[in-house]
Image (cartoon, rainbow, N blue to C red):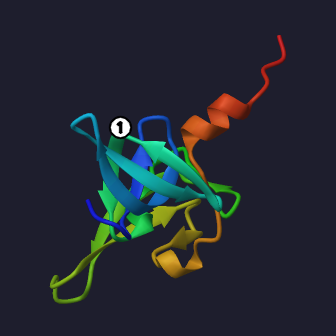
Amino acid sequence: MKVGDYVRTYDGVIGKIIDDNFAQEEKRYELDYNNKLYYFQQIVKSSTNIIDLIEVGDYVNGKKVIDTFIDYIFDYSEEFKVIRFSETNILHNANHIKSIVTKEQFSSMQYKVN
């Protein structure tokens, strides 16, 4: 992982690494998360492309992700991740992502009525 990569933490935060440093021999990452700075050590996934961090159950642009899969360019020379919201609604370009709420964040914010 390096500065500029996107990461997903164990508690579902997705952010971009803006600095990395060492503290007590453990790697710490400074993340830009909603224009705030956070420090994390427990990174679950990292990628140069934010779309790679999206999982089933997350919400992208306000829509719930029901499936993710890998597709390929015609000659199989390049693969890319596809996000499915419904049978007819898919996203395959990270440039179209405006917001992400991970399933962990959604779960921690919900209020259950008994």
- On the image, numbered disc 1 is attached to which residue? 42
Identity of the residue drawn at 47% across and 45% down? 39
Residue depicted at 57% across the width and 40% down the height = 103
From the viewer's side, name the closer residue of 12 and 57. Answer: 12
Image quadrant occupied by the C terminus: top right
Quadrant in the picture for residue 106: top right
Check the image and name the residue furthest to the right: 113
User: Which residue is at the far front?
Assistant: 24
Q: Quadrant of residue 44?
A: top left
Position of 11 relative to 75 (above/below): above
**Amino acid marked by disc 1:** Gln
Residue 37 drawn at (x, y percent): 57, 53
Q: Quadrant of residue 92?
A: bottom left
Residue 108 against residue 91 in the figure, above or below = above
Between 84 and 4, the one lying in front of the other is 4
From what the image shows, is residue 73 above or below residue 114? Answer: below
Q: Position of residue 66 (x, y in %)?
A: 52, 51
Along the line of sight, the residue nearer the viewer: 3 or 99: 3
Location of residue 34 with respect to 56 vertically, above or below: below
